[in-house]
Amino acid sequence: MTQSAPRQVVAIGLDAMEPALVQEMMEGGDLPHMAALLQQGAWGRVASPADIGSAAVWPTFSTGQDPLLHGVCSLWGWDPSRMRASPITLNHLKPFWGEAARAGFAVGVFDVPFAPSIGVPGGVEILEWGAHDWVRRRTVVAPASVRKLVKGFGGRHPFAVRPLDSWSSVADDEGRTAIAAQALEGARRRGAVAAQLLLTRRLDLLVLVFSEAHRASHVLWHAVEPEHPLHAGAGELRQALLEIYRELDRQVGLLVDRADDDATILVFSLHGMRGTRGIPTMLHALLPALGLATPAPAAGGPSRVGPRQAINLTRRLAPRYPRSLYHRVVPPSTALRLAGPPDAIPAYDWSRTVAFPLPTDQHGWIRLNLAGREGAGIVEPGRYEETCLQLERTLLGLRNVDGLPVVKRVLRPGSTSSRLPDLVVHWDDRAATDPMCLQAPPVCAGLRGTNLTGQHAPDGFFLVRGPAITRSALGDCVQAVDLHRVILDGLNR
């Protein structure tokens, strides 16, 4: 990569903005700045590994690597040596902007989700200032001179007040309206900081991500999806979500104005949103019923409550002030470990467990207890393919009590050396019943996260304008793993 007459590139991620809604609003005149970019550039689909898990999409974009290589698909990673889930780390990731910085370009990175802090000499790093997912649980702002700018123009992002369950437990219109207001204010503050960066520092490359639509969509999506059971009477919430989209369009326009006249502008989302009624928990009951997983005997009797469960129960039942004090006093990383994953792995007798579910925020994830890979593995490597195939056939054959299928498809993203799930279960909409009961084996299980009404959809979009950028050059679809090449190419045009 050579630095010859660099042209500025501004890449603006609009996390989880739904392409269909963006197109509808552009056609209706609600997103004039993005529509203006479209008149001068190209639009297309971004295909990403959101069908594995939403957390896989940003490391795929930033590293240009397939999830099999970077190994991230959740906030909780599986530790096969210790047979438990732990909060992920990001130090092994090598983002593409490091290459640009080493080539001498001035790089700015602002709240790219799941991004490691690598240091960008002569540039700017602002990470987890107002992120949707807090991986390291602390904000990074470098160099020190930028901290004053962030404080003066952005202050504290509303998402920075972040008890672990502060948004995901929202279940009424008052709470949903509050999240919408936080998202709207956060978008304005983020745009103000980014605009000042472009005004006060010479940046050849700025990679900036607005996370506000992501969080708001999780709690407001029923307002824009007529088929959702909560849609009726959600007119005010619909306007709140649309106003967030409009505000993000205004911020795009502001940043385009601050960028160089001949800059390449890339606006993109890596996945969209769709309606949801909850996350099926069937795998916890199904795998033991199939004889593939054996729960460990409860030490001290079935009513025993462990330290983590006791702490979390006390926290949830505590009055509001002591609960907020807990979140202020206990370091976020410690609180995360105490809380554990939202879909915790039960204790298993690993000597009698062939397959087990991993903690998930959407799809069903199954991992084999593979000998030589798992610390307590029992499935011989020679039986890996056979066991996966049998499980896949069983899952696709599941029927509810009405005789209708509950699994849409099963993906096989993993490998015998991977930390990803070996199988990813995409549930059919029929699985979104509480409880969901199967014909065979005759088990029932409920839903979790029923208060959230929006869930990740697999496809995102790109909207790009710049020198020599044409639809024919990019095609109608760009893989998320290749999107960084559009950015790096733009620097040398």
Image: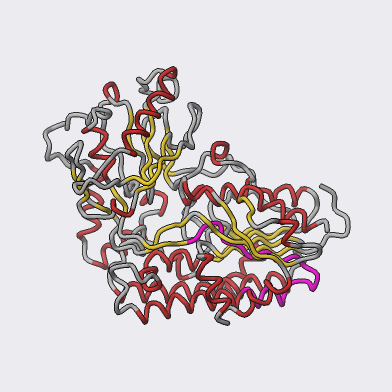
| 464, 225: nearer the viewer | 225
Q: Is residue 376 magenta?
A: no
User: Residue 180: x percent and y percent?
Assistant: 42, 74
Q: Is residue 186 above or below residue 87?
A: below
Residue at x 50% of width, y 70% of height = 21
Q: Which residue occupies the foreground of this view, 366 or 403?
A: 403
Judge whether 119 appears above or below 141 on screen: above
- Expressed as whole percent of the image width and height from the top left, the position of residue 145 reads 67, 65
Residue furthest to the right: 4
Q: Quadrant of the C terminus?
A: bottom right
Give the residue at x 29% y 46%.
Answer: 405
Front residue of 396 and 314 = 396
Q: Quadrant of residue 267?
A: bottom right
The answer to which of 372 and 311 lies nearer the viewer is 372
As displayed, is residue 4 above or below residue 464? above
Residue 98 at x, y percent in the picture:
70, 48
> Residue visible at 58% across and 47% down?
60
Q: Which residue range is magenta in the image?
A: 252-272
Residue 296: x and y in percent read 21, 29
The answer to whether any part of residue 138 appears in the image is: yes
Is any part of residue 142 visible from this angle?
no
The answer to if 255 sits in the magenta stretch is yes
Q: In this rendering, would 260 be left or right of 88? A: right
